[in-house]
Image (cartoon, rainbow, N blue to C red):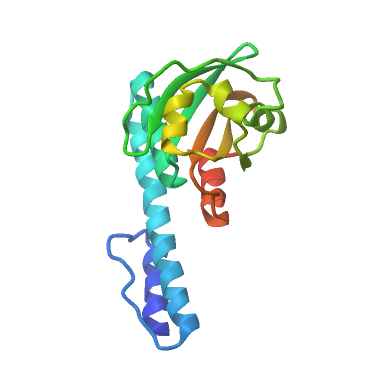
Amino acid sequence: PLRALAGEAESIRHFEFSRPVAVRSTVREVDELAVTIDSMKRTIRRFLDISSAVAAEEDFDRLLPLLLDEMITVADADAGVMYLLEGQTLNPVAARREGGSNLTGTLRPADMNNRDMLIGRALHESKTCVSAMAPGDLDGIGITNDLKAIGVRHGIAVPLINRKREPVGVILLLRQTAIEDAQLSFVTALSGS
């Protein structure tokens, strides 16, 4: 099994992600390593697929929901809202459920300087912020009935920062359950924050 895992590591080095890791061992640590390597292969493949899709899309208006859908998938979120910054206002440009359907209802713009809201805190701190969603956070987004129907209780606010390190928006990912550390690390790496 260790030789097979070394071969899998070599295939990753050569960007070969097509086949899953099928190594099993009676040694628990070796078996856990096989599962981790398989997960790593899938994660890298997903990242490359996302990068290709973003690079190929020429229509900015179609790109935004695509990015939001991918972030929802990566974070295993139940819903998400993307905001773009105009002046001091965060304007919602896309709101989606898991699976790609639009959330219905009216979204509300938000003040980027409102640090009481999770999205304002993420922009102010220029880092991904995670917390339980307070009722005020849900009301501040709008579409409250949809979000309550989904049962969201946790939020992940990912600031969108350009190459000059200036904020351009934020993605708010909404979940019924708290996010795991591994998912948070990938979401943060994917967003570049």
x, y percent for residue 139? 56, 23
Q: Residue at x 40, y 77 (%)?
A: 5
Q: Is residue 189 above or below residue 2?
A: above
x, y percent for residue 119? 61, 29
Q: Residue furthest left?
A: 19
Which quadrant is the C terminus positioned in?
top right
Question: Is 2 in front, or is 129?
Answer: 129
* Residue 64 visible to the viewer: yes
Q: Residue furthest top?
A: 87
The reply, left or right, for residue 63 in relation to residue 139 is left
The reply, left or right, for residue 140 in relation to residue 97 is right
Q: Residue at x 31, y 66 (%)?
A: 20
Q: Is residue 18 above or below residue 107?
A: below
* Residue 67 visible to the viewer: no
Which quadrant is the N terminus positioned in?
bottom left
Q: Residue at x 38, y 49 (%)?
A: 46
Q: Quadrant of residue 164?
A: top right
Q: Residue at x 54, y 50 (%)?
A: 179
Marks counted in the figure total: 0
Question: Is 3 in front, or is 37?
Answer: 37
x, y percent for residue 69? 38, 35
x, y percent for residue 106? 44, 15
